[in-house]
Amino acid sequence: MKHIRNFCIIAHIDHGKSTLADRLIQTCDGVAQRDMHAQMLDSMDIERERGITIKSNTMTLDHTSPDGTEYQLNLIDTPGHVDFSHEVRRSLMACEGALIIVDASQGVEAQTVANLYLAMEHDLELLPVINKIDLMTADVDRAREAIDAELGLDPFEAIPVSAKTGEGIEDVLAGIVEKLPCPTGDPNAPLKALVFDAHFDKFRGVILQVRVMEGTLKPRDMIHFMHLGRDFKVDELGYKQMKLVPKKQLSAGEVGYIVAGVKSVQDIEIGDTITQLDRPADEPIPGYQEAKQVVFSSIYPMSADEYKDLTKALDKLAINDAALTYEKDSSAALGFGFRCGFLGLLHLDVIQERLQREFDIGLVISAPSVKYKLTLKDGSEIDVDNPSYWPNPIQIESCSEPYIKASILTPEEYVGPIMELCREHRSESQTMNYLSAGRLEVISEMPLGEVLFDFYGKLKMITRGYGSFDYEPIEYRKTDVVKVDILVNKEPVDTLSYLVHREKARTRALHYCERLAKEIPRHQFKIPIQGVIGGNVIARSTIAPFRKDVTEKLYGGDVSRKKKLLEKQKKGKAKMKQFGSVNIPQKAFVSVLRADND
């Protein structure tokens, strides 16, 4: 066990985690040179294209130190985006140490600080690494000052590297061996193994990634999931390198994989504790948390014929992504679809793109919303995330919405616009911490629903890309939320209903009405488009009708002839309006909801 090191790499998004992982794999000969490519641990096309890690991944490396000692390094690459912080949390539980990366040109950013606190919660030994020293704009001394002032770590322990060129990688490997602690645990104790990740293989079922804390596990052992209470038989176990390498056993301190005939990721819970059925542990490993969906949205196929394809596609995605939840939903305008729960807007964006790319399905996605807690007049409490299930306002006693604590790191000159942006998004409190010369942190408490639409994009725009944003849910607080219905020709369109704070209701309703007025084609009669709260109209646009000049054939005579024809036309229009139906084209829904997301 002295020669094992379990560590993960944590950093802000785009600070070079995956590139550093590539260099460590290359230096330890974890993959043949001809098979080497960028972002080795990122398995999805979307991850490679966007340069982000969505799914954490792991690899066992063999490293020989300069004195000839052989070490086993278990590397876990983690996502950098705030939406996937639950993946980071699970990965940290499987490690004793972490490399915390700081970009030499950008310094410490919001997610770096958030991940630092997560690592400190789990008592990990931290080794700072200053990456991208090959850039023209790199300032290693300033990065050391930031590590000291903002992270509270020893700046002289920080190892300067360039993951792109490979400079300093040997120093990182030496630092891992010398500075990070070896695992502890008793191989003879009852088995305790943490399931920190899983992925689906179409031939073998679910392959579990586990860290053995206590005891020893062998093939053919019967295992028991302590939270779910389910039992499986181990078919195979071993180390995960570029391919799976079977072994005779996994014992305390080791990280590896288990194949146990599990059919779907939804049959297990990531973060659960595995023990042996015939010799169970007394209690599970502490720190288990379920992934919480915070954003909800309805997904409909562009064509009703694709509903079966969408059902199969979501089933396949859910096999690999346990954080995605979905249930059947229907809309009068768009037909059958699904109400889905996501970890955040990036998670929604990734699922949407995978559905379109991997399964070739055209989608219409409703405006995302959060979960509200309602207390009704009869004393009962309900949770609502779908406007369709919003009760009659007369029955509602009070309503609460989720709040977050947002942390924004920014250069000093952008503080004014950031404070104004937070106020626009109903921020309740704002405090500032000066971190280092010219750099500060703005901490603000605001509703999660306000961050969903355009907050992150506006923040990047006003700070010219230098601002970074991270948040954590804190609590539910009382609020004044209303349901706004959109009426087209006095008929409600359920797909376009949304829940919003009363202050913002009119602005959003105007946006919806104007968009629909542009997209819905003209009819033979006037079409009113209205945004309403209950019986009160708060916004309106009108689509003018086609008009035929019925008096064109008249060339003279008494004015009463003209009036008679116009009166006849007026009655015809009124009758048409009474019985005519408005066809809303699919692109009208898409344009309204897309513009709202943008």
Image (tube, rainbow, N blue to C red):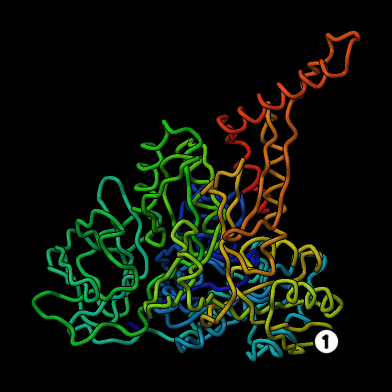
Nearer-the-camera pick, 130 or 428: 428
Residue 523 appears at what percent x and percent y? 67, 28
Residue 68 visible (yes or no): no
Tell me: 178 left or right of 564. left
Residue at x-position 25% and y-position 71%? 250
Residue 391 appears at what percent x and percent y? 45, 65
- Secondary structure state at the residue bearing disc 1: loop
Tell me: 108 left or right of 204. right
Residue 501 appears at what percent x and percent y? 63, 69
Kind of residue at badge 1: Ala
Residue at x-position 32% and y-position 67%? 256
Residue 34 appears at what percent x and percent y? 51, 46
- Check the image and name the residue furthest to the right: 556
Residue 367 is drawn in which quadrant? bottom right
Residue at x-position 51% and y-position 49%? 494
Residue beneath label 1, please? Answer: 437
Q: Is residue 148 above or below residue 402?
A: below
Nearer-the-camera pick, 105 or 1: 105
Tell me: 179 left or right of 312. right
- Check the image and name the residue furthest to the left: 278
Residue 293 is drawn in which quadrant? bottom left
Nearer-the-camera pick, 536 or 588: 536
| Label 1 crowd (10 A; few <14 / some 14-19 / many >=20) | few
Residue 67 visible (yes or no): yes
Residue 462 is drawn in which quadrant? bottom right
Residue at x-position 48% and y-position 37%? 361
Name the quarter where the N terminus is drawn. bottom left
Q: How many marks?
A: 1
